[in-house]
Image (cartoon, helix red, strand yellow):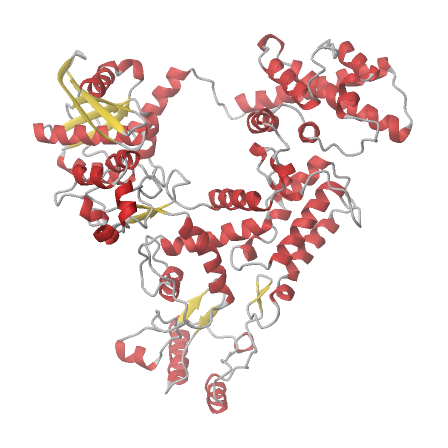
Amino acid sequence: MINGNKGMFKLFQGLRICRGVTPLTHLFFADDSLFFMEDKGRSSTNLRRVLKNYCTASGQVINDDKSGLIFSPNTMLRQVRLCLKVFRIKKNKGFGKYLGLPTDFQESKKDIFKGLVENVLLRISSWNGLFLSPAGRLTLILSVLSNLSIFFLSVFKIPVSVTKKINSLLSHFWWAGFRAGRSLHWCSRLFSNLPKREGGLGIRNIECLNRALLAKHAWRLVNNEDKSLFCRVFRERIFGRESYVQGMPIRHKGNKSWGVRSILHGLDFVLQNIAWKPGIDSNLNVWSARWVDGGMPEPVDLLLEEGFGFMKDLRIKDLCFNGGGWNEGMVRLIFKQESVDKILATPIISTRIHDEVFRPFSNDGRYTVKSGYGVIFEEFFNNNGTLKDKERLNLKKKRFCKTTLWKLPGPQMWKILLWKIIIGSLPGLREVETLEHLFRDCDVSSRIWFGSVLGIRTNQNNSLDLGEWIISWITYLKGQKENCYGLIHFLATLNSIWLLRNNSVFRGETFVPKFFFKQLGTLASLVIKTLEIKNTNDGDGDGVSITNESEELENQSNCLKNGLPHFIIGPFGSCNRWRIMVDASWDETGIAAFGWAVLGAEGKPLFEGMLKGRAESPLQAEAIGVLKVLEWAKAQGFLHLEVSSDCLSMLQQWGGVAHKHHHIKGIMEEIASISTSFHCLCFSFVRRNLNKIAHSLAKRAMRDC
C-alpha cells in the first residue's frame, strides 16, 4: 500500500540519507513503525490516506497518544503546522532512547556513552554481598561483564576514554574484587587480555572488541552476497554503487553521521585483511589486489627496475587463455618462482564469473567476530604491549598454557593459582619470600612433598625455576597411565601448601602434619570422586555408547551416504552403479597428483587412471581429484556412479556444512554442475587401507608423470 503504483509512489517520496541512494519510505519493527517522507505537495495527505485504508482493511487502529511527528531543523513552520493538522498527533523532539541508547547525537559522545560505564559499575555493585573467589570473578567477567554492552559496541564506535574506563573496571574487579580505591595489579592489563592459549586470561579488550564487531557490518558491505536493505543503502552511501569491487574509492562528500563513521572504522580493518578469488572474467589489477593465496604476487626483478612499464595496469584475465586455464609461459615470465607455484595452483572455476572476496584468516573465507578480534588484538598488543609483557613467558611455558593448563582436572581455582605461579605474579608474597622457597625449597614444603602420595624429593632438579619445575612434573604425571590420579594429588598438594602459608601468615596457625595430610587426602579424594561421577554421567547419562574407531568411521560413512541431497542424482541403491575409488597426493610446491580405479564385482580394478595437476592445499587436491574423475567418467559414458574417497573432511564439507572451506567452494559448484550429467551419483567414505589402489596410483603419478 505504501509503494503502490507508480502514480501513488510519485505522490509519496521517501527520504535519502545522501544523494544517489535508495530512498527509505518505512521501517517496521516488532511493535513500532517508522515512516519517512519529504514534505512536498500532498505527501502528508497521501500518507494519512494510506494509513486510513490499512486500518479499514485490517481492523486495527492507530494509537495517537503513542505516535508522534519529528521534523528536520530546516522544515518551514507553515509545513509543520499543516502536517500536525493532517495527522492530528503531537510533535516530538526526537526518537528518545532505543535499547538504552539515545538516537540523537547532539551532545558530547563521552557524555552519551557514559551510561555503559555506569551499567558495569551497577552490575558489579549488585554482587557486593557475594563471597567470590578469583575463579568466580573471572567467570563473571568473561560471561557477564564483557558482554554487558555488546549491542552498543556492535553499532557505534565507542570513545577511547569510555573503553579504557570499562577495561580498568574489569581489571580492578579481577584483582581487587569489591575493594574501593586503588589496587595493586600483579600483571599488566594487556597481558591479562591475551588469549588463554598465549598465557593470558582471555579477558577481552573492549576497544578491540568494539572494532571487531563494527568490522562485521563492514564485511557485509564488502561481501556482495548480502542483499539486505542495510547493505544496499550503505553500499550506495559509502561506495556509490550497489556492489563492491577491488580498489573502489570511498565517498567522502557530505557530513557523515556517527553511525557511518563507526562503519568506516571497521571498514579500514576489513579492507586491509581481505583477499580475492578471481573469476573467469576477472578485472582485478594484478599488482594491487591480494589474489595469490591471500597475498600479492612478487614480480621478477626486471619489472621492478623498469617500474612495471606497460604492465602497470595488467589484469588477471590477461594471464588466462580464452578457454580457461593459466597462460603458464606468461606467468613464469612475469613472476618469481614462489608466486608462480601459487598462481598455477589456483584453479580457474568455470562457474565463478565474477571475482569473490574472502577472508584468508578463516577456513570458510567468511568474517567472524572471533577471528577478527584475534587479528585486531594481536596488532594492538604488538603496538602497545611492553617488552616485559612480550617476554614474560618462554616458549615452554607458552606451550604449556596453550595445550595443558586450562584442560587440567580439578577446580578452576587450582588452574588460576597455577597460572599466577607460572607468570610469576602471585600476590601477597613478603619481601623475603620467593616462589621457589615457598612451594618447594623450605623445610615445611619439602616435608609435605616427600610425605605426600607421590613422595617427591625436592632437592632434585631444584635449579629450575618453580614454573618449569611444576610443568616438568605435570608432563611426567600425565604420561603415567598406571597412576592416573597422581596428577590430581600433585595439584591438590600445590593448592594446600598455598592455603597453609596464608593461614600461617594471616591467622597464626601452625603446621600439624597429621591434620594437614588428612585434609589433603580428603580434598584429593573428593575431586577424584567428582570427576568419576562426571565421567559416568557423560558416558551413560544420555545412553551414549563408546565405539571403536572403525565403527565410528562406518557410522560416519553411513551418515554421509544419506546426507548429500545436493550430490545424489536418482534414488540411492536403486541401480547398478560403477564404483570408482579416488585419491590425491600433494606437496608444498602446489603440485598435485590424482589416481582412480574402477572396481569390478569382485573388487578387482577394471579401469585405472592417473593425472598430474596443481592445488592450493591437500583438501583442494582431494576435491579436484573427484572433479577429474567425474569428467573422465562422463567422457567414458558412465551414467551410474558411486565415488569413494578416504578424505573424510572433504566429504563432511559436502554433507551439509553451512559455509564451505574457501579452497573447495568453487570446485564443489563445478561438481554440482557436472553431476546433472549422471542418472545416479553418490559419494561414500572408505578407509585408507581399503583405498590402496587409488593411493598407489596417485603416488606413482606424482613420481613419474
For this orientation, the residue located farthest to the bottom is 78
Residue 286 appears in the figure: no
Q: Residue 547 sits in which quadrant?
A: top left
Side of 204 relative to 61 (left or right): right
At a point 30% along the width and 46% down the height, the residue shown is 304
Vertically, is 509 above or below 211? above
Front residue of 578/399: it is 399
For this orientation, the residue located farthest to the right is 508
Q: Position of residue 460 (x, y in %)?
A: 71, 10
Side of 580 relative to 233 (left or right): left
At a point 33% along the width and 25% down the height, the residue shown is 648
Side of 106 relative to 568 (left or right): right
Q: Residue 386 sits in which quadrant?
A: top right
Q: Position of residue 617 (x, y in %)?
A: 32, 31
At a point 59% along the width and 54% down the height, the residue shown is 149
Q: Position of residue 520 (x, y in %)?
A: 77, 18
Vertically, is 322 above or below 679? below
Residue 549 appears in the figure: yes
Vertically, is 479 above or below 263? above
Vertically, is 2 above or below 558? below
Q: Position of residue 176 (x, y in %)?
A: 76, 43
Front residue of 11/430: it is 430
Front residue of 478/199: it is 199
